[in-house]
Amino acid sequence: MTAEFAALILLTKRGPVVDQWEGEMTDQLRYVVLAKVHSLRGNLAMGVVPNGKGGGFLRKANKLRQLHYSFDMERRAFRRARLGPFMGPPPIGVYENSFIIKDITISLDIAIQRSMQKWWSEITVREEPIDQIQNLWYDHLGISNWARMASEHTTDIGCGFHKYSGKGKVVCQFRSTLKEGSKLYTPGPTCNQCPGGKATCVNGLCPADLEGVC
């Protein structure tokens, strides 16, 4: 028996290959979402995120929180992702990031992390640093995807995905009160203003708001 034939028998015994892109969000994928966004926000809070290409870093954040995972946001993200090429811009008042994955042979966890890293990179690839004297967000800065992920006004996240026309789409929605011209986050010593004190801080982030909604 050749190795190729043995592998074919083993694959047959295991059943058909499941296309992850046709499935639903799992607890493992929800963990991937939270782990990735918390890693990125934690880096921001600790002052190790580049402020553009100039070599400087964004200021530390003194009360940046962990996020809740929202099943409501997840359901909405799935509905949007399933629109495929007809998705269009999000409705007014909806905080949403989306990204097209051209290689759908990669695993969903990698696709989700790649999408989130792409959104986050808006701040790191800027030719000029953003002004952090007032630390205000404006859409014309071209960092809106990053701002939705990074802002201290964002409390919840939920994500969905869909495959169409040989491509995949990852969509994440956020519960946030970030507004044009509002402060992105409060600069200062990491975790210095956590409601429960510095002892509650984990990897640069204060605990999630207890009033978060699932």
Image (tube, rainbow, N blue to C red):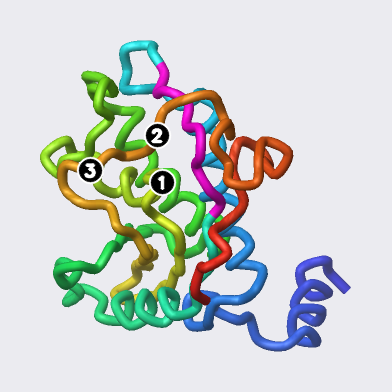
Residue position marked by numbered label 2 in the rendering:
186
Residue furthest to the left in view is: 140
Along the line of sight, the residue nearer the viewer: 158 or 178: 178
Q: Is residue 61 left or right of residue 173?
A: right
- Inter-mark Cα distance, 2 to 1: 8 Å
Helix, strand or loop at mark 2:
loop
In the image, residue 214 above or below residue 105: below
The answer to whether marks 2 and 1 mark residues whose Cβ atoms lie closer than 8 Å is yes
The amino acid sitting under disc 2 is: Thr
Residue tagged 3? 182
Q: Position of residue 86 (x, y in %)?
A: 17, 77
Q: Tell me the distance, in whole angstroms, between the alpha carbons under discs 1 and 3.
A: 11 Å
Where, by quadrant of the figure, is residue 130 drawn?
Answer: top left
- Front residue of 152/26: it is 152
Q: Position of residue 188 (x, y in %)?
A: 47, 25
Kind of residue indicated by mark 1: Glu
| Residue ID for mark 1 | 152
Q: Secondary structure at mark 1?
A: loop
Q: Nearer the N terminus, badge 1 or badge 3?
A: 1
Label 3 CA crowd tier, 10 Å (few <14, some 14–19, many 20+): some
Q: How dense is the environment of label 1, judged by Cα within 10 Å: few (below 14), some, or many (20 and up)?
A: many
CB under 8 Å between callouts 1 and 3? no
Q: Quadrant of residue 146?
A: top left
Q: Residue at x 32, y 32 (%)?
A: 123
Tell me the chief SS of the magenta region: loop
Q: Amino acid at mark 3?
A: Ser
Q: Quadrant of residue 110?
A: bottom right
Q: In the rendering, at what x and y percent does residue 70 appear?
A: 49, 72
Q: Give the residues drawn in magenta, as a range.
A: 57-66
